[in-house]
Image (spheres, rainbow, N blue to C red):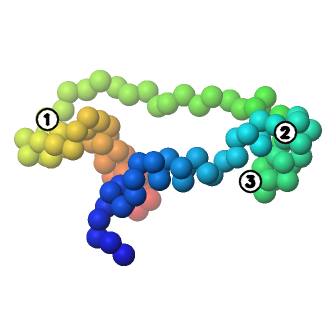
Amino acid sequence: MSNEPASTMHSAAELRNRAAGRSDLPRVRAMTEAALEAAIAADPDWAGIPPDWHARAEPVPAARKQLVSVRLDADILAWFRARGPGYQTRINAVLRAFVDSADRA
């Protein structure tokens, strides 16, 4: 096995062809509605899912965030910011994991 990253081991064309080969889109487009329904019914991933699942689905709103001002050590803030956009979300995730862990203890 090569030590090269996967992205350089294959050409872009090879990767596109590999991904394109996962679905036979012309075959799917040529299927009748009845054939599609039969294929879905035979798919084990759909077992037990009611046909009207979408009619019963309810959107779940994201938890509201509250704007706060908090003082953090400069090195802690620098560490999170150095990882790029979304650092506040990552800080929130760390705090959430701490709270969840403390609740289980």
Q: Amino acid at mark 2?
A: Met
Front of the two marks 3 and 1: 3
In the image, 37: left or right of 20? right
Towards the viewer: 95 or 84: 84
Q: Considering the numbered disc 3 on the image, is that residue within a helix, a strand or a loop? A: helix
Q: Is residue 83 left or right of residue 28?
A: left
Picture quadrant of residue 90: top left
Q: Which residue is mark 3?
A: 45
Which circle, 2 or 1, is nearer the viewer? 2
In this orientation, which residue lies closer to the viewer: 14 or 90?
A: 14
Compared to residue 9, the image places residue 41 above or below, namely above
What residue is shown with label 2? 31
Foreground: disc 2 or disc 3: 2
- Expressed as whole percent of the image width and height from the top left, the position of residue 73 reads 9, 43
* Mark 2 or 3, nearer chain start: 2
Where residue 58 sits in the image (x, y, percent)?
68, 29
Residue hosting label 1: 71
Name the residue rendered at 92%, 38% in the picture: 34
User: Which amino acid type corresponds to the residue marked 3 in the rendered image?
Assistant: Asp
Q: Give me the C-alpha separation between circle 3 and circle 1.
A: 48 Å
Which image quadrant: the C terminus? Answer: bottom left
The answer to which of marks 3 and 1 sits earlier in the sequence is 3
Mark sitting on residue 24: none
Amino acid bearing label 1: Arg
